[in-house]
Image: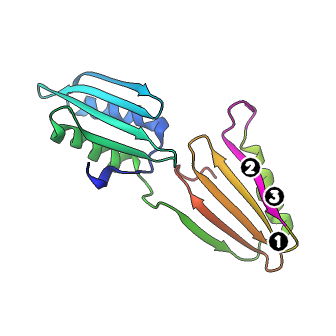
Amino acid sequence: MSSDFKELNIVKTRLEESIQKFWETNNCQQGKYFSVRKGLDRAEYVQDGSQVTVDFYCKNNGTITIQTKVGKNYDKGEQLAIYLRDELVDDDRKSISVSIRNIDKDSFNLLLEFLEDLKGDNSADPVISVSLNSEDSLRKVMRTTSKYNDSLTLTHHLTTNRLQIQGKPALPPIW
C-alpha cells in the first residue's frame, strides 16, 4: 500500500459524495459504496471496462487509510485515491500545538461555554464532548473529542494567562 494514502485527514461525511463525483467525471458504471464491517467501507465500480475495488479503513485516530491494492486494476483504484486525497485533504498535519498569550480566566471560560454549545441538542450523539482532565492552582486542562475520534487538549495556564492547544484535529476547524 502506498504511504501516500495512509492516515489521511478526510472528513468521512464528504467521502461518499466525492466518490460519486469521481465516478461521474470518469464515466464509471455500476458504482456502489458500502460498509463491509465496522471500520471498513468499500467502493466497487467499473472503469473503462475494468472492475475496480477500493477499501477505506476508518482508523481509531480519526483518519482514513485508502487501500487500492484490492482485487485487480490497482492503477485505476489509485486514480480514485489520488482524486480523494487532492479533493478532501485540506490539512495533512497529524497533530498541532499552538500557544496563545493574554487569555484570562473569563476568556477561557467563554471559550468553554462556546464548546459546550457545540454539543447540540442531541445528547445521545453529540457533535463534540468536553471533559475536565485536571485542575489545580496553576492550570486547568480540558479535552474535547468528536464523534470522528479527533481530539484537542486545551490547557489554560492561570499564572501566565497562556492558552495551549494540542491535539489531532481530523476535521476542518468548526469555529
Q: What residue type is labelled 1?
A: Asp
Residue 11 belongs to magenta span: no
Q: Which residue is drawn at 63% across and 44% down?
A: 146
As drawn, the label of residue 110 is 3
Find the residue positioned furthest to the left.
49
Residue 8 appears at what percent x and percent y?
40, 50
Going from N to C along the chain, the mark reached first, 1 or 3, is 1
Q: Which of marks 2 and 3 is in front?
A: 2
Q: Give the range drawn in magenta.
A: 120-135
Question: Mark 1 packing: few (<14 Cα in 10 Å), some, or many (20+)?
Answer: some
Sequence-wise, the earlier of marks 2 and 3 is 3
Q: Is mark 3 on a helix, strand or loop?
A: helix
> Residue at left 76%, top 32%?
121
Residue type beneath disc 3: Leu
Tell me where residue 152 appears, x and y as whole percent. Answer: 63, 57
Label 2 crowding class (10 Å Cα cut-off): few <14, some 14-19, many 20+? some
Determine the image quadrant of residue 92: bottom left
Is tag 2's residue or tag 1's residue first in the polypeptide sequence?
1
Horizontal relation, residue 29 to residue 146: left or right: left
| Residue 161, image quadrant | bottom right
The residue carrying mark 2 is: 130
Residue at 39% x, 31% y: name it.
Answer: 41
Type of amino acid under label 2: Val
Q: Contact (CB < 8 A) between labels 2 and 1?
A: no
Residue 29, numbered label: none
- Which sits in the foreground, 90 or 35? 35
